[in-house]
Image (tube, rainbow, N blue to C red):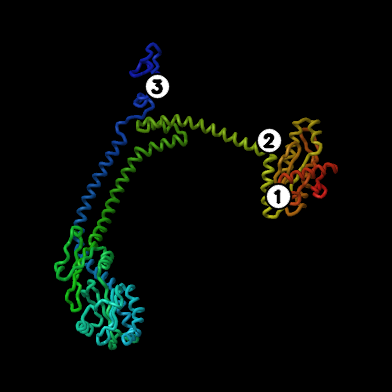
Amino acid sequence: MRRTCGHPRPGCAASAAMPGWPKFCVPMPNQIIGDHDGIGMKSPGKTIHTRLLLLLAAVAALSIMGLLGLHLLQQRQIAAVQGARDQEFRGQFGRLLALHSATLASFTSDYSYWDEMVNFVGSGDRGWAVINIDAALPPAIAYAAWVFDPQFALVYGTDVENGADKPLAPPLATVELRELLRRQPFAHFYADSPVGLLEVRTAPIQPSADSARVTEPRGYLVGARRWDAAHLASIGQSADSRVVLESATAAAGGPEAGDEDRGRLRLNLTLPGWNGAPVARLGVYGNSLATSIWQSQLRQQLISYAVMCTIVLILLRLALTRWVERPLQALARGLEAGDERSLARLEAANTEFSGISRLLRDHLMQRRELERENSERRLLQTELLRLANSDPLTGLANRRVFRDRLGKQLQSAGGTGAGVGVLYADLDLFKAINDSHGHEIGDRFLQVIAERLQNCARSNDIVARFGGDEFLICVDSVSDRSEVEQVARRMLRVLAEPVRINALEIRPSASVGISYFPDHGHDADTLIVRADEAMYRAKQRGRNRYSVFDLAAAN
């Protein structure tokens, strides 16, 4: 933004209001946005919007060409596969009808080839029939069944609605039945009935030992399935088609096609009666042809669209790389590495990102300042944490940290059964060192003592300065008191070595009190107090020694 100018500018609030003042120009907000010399973005000749419109026009042209090619390909493909698909659908539907009839065929075949069925023809045991024949109809999806003796007299009849009390009449008269079964024992035909069209299958009743089915029939089993709306819907659903059933006379030309059936495969099937004469006709409007063709067309479309999408993606990639990715990479380098040269080049490129690059320069300066402040804040926080948790003179843990960590170790030891020892050390005659040599020498002396205590303790032990010339050591995970006393003896031996500060040599000593968990207490404060009492008992006995707290003596 220009701060001054050599002449008043139109719209300048300062120049218009006070013409006698120096000609300082303060841009208004609308001038800042529209001024090409200010912070506002550049207005290049070709914008991203114009370039994207050109790209979309190219994509639209390619799409139209691809659709025209697909349309021509579809027409040729439909003409080529029409005949083959019609024949294939006929075969598929015929196999589907056979599959739907398989349960009825299995019922008549299995139950007629059975010794108990042979005995039933002779006995006519109604209870056996109810348990074996009536119960078998629903699983076989059969509606009715009839059992005849060798002279074609009805032994038993039943259906799923009325049972054996009032069964449906047999599909054929006795004369017709005799004529059919003597000529063709295993028959399959269709017949009209009071409940609608029936699919009928017959089988001769023979002993189980007659695996070849060549002996004289002991009777005949006839099973029927009702072709109602539910059965037709099941066939249509399996064939993905619309199935229509009409009488043989009304359907001589086949069922009439509705608007929803236009363009679908039309198939007419004749359902024969017992003598071969048509009983009904089955009209099928299948989706097999359309589905197969459109699947093939879809594959071609996917390939074509994949090619077109690949071309579009390549064009978009090139456009985005040139107009978006490279400028954004320059912005990213400027932000991440503080590379102001990348921002300067982007600003000079006269693109939509030029104004952003100027704003990022100010952002980089603010970020550097924030990073500096954050670094100083982190250092300050680290120092405050160190001062809160450690002794400022020796660097050891302070009284609060020692209590907390000792409490946690006592909880852990209570669960494992291990012991914990607390050593309370007080330097002998330290006041005389301060009075004779000054506090500076005394502070240096305490630092040396702290370093020695830290070295003689184990790696998992806690060493803390409790205050003044008093130190605490927590000896963790010990099996008996001897380990704690061993640490105390090592401490006295190390502390007894002379301390040399400048030209001064000091021979220190200390009195150490010991308390032991769980014998002397179960909490941190009790163990510290009792270690302190044991330390005073060591001083009373002549200093430079350790003393274990005596609970009996204390009581």
Q: Which residue is mark 3?
A: 2
**What quarter of the picture does the N terminus occupy?**
top left
SS for callout 1: strand
Q: Is residue 428 left or right of residue 177?
A: right
Q: Is residue 249 left or right of residue 512?
A: left
Front residue of 195 and 206: 195
State the image quarter where residue 10 is shown. top left
- Kind of residue sitting beneath label 2: Pro
- Kind of residue sitting beneath label 3: Arg
Confirm whether residue 346 shows in the render. yes
- Tell me the distance, in whole angstroms, between the alpha carbons under discs 2 and 1: 25 Å
Q: Residue at x 65, y 37 (%)?
A: 388
- Please report contact status of discs 3 and 2: CB closer than 8 Å, yes or no: no
Q: Spot the residue most to the front.
A: 165
Q: Which mark is residue 193?
A: none
At label 3, counting other C-alpha atoms closer than 10 Å, the crowd grade (few under 14, some 14-19, many 20 or more) is few
Q: Which mark is residue 476?
A: 1
Front residue of 81 and 145: 145
- Kind of residue sitting beneath label 1: Asp
Q: Which residue is mark 2?
A: 392
Image coordinates of residue 96 in percent, x first then y, are 27, 69
- Tell me the distance, in whole angstroms, between the alpha carbons under discs 3 and 2: 55 Å
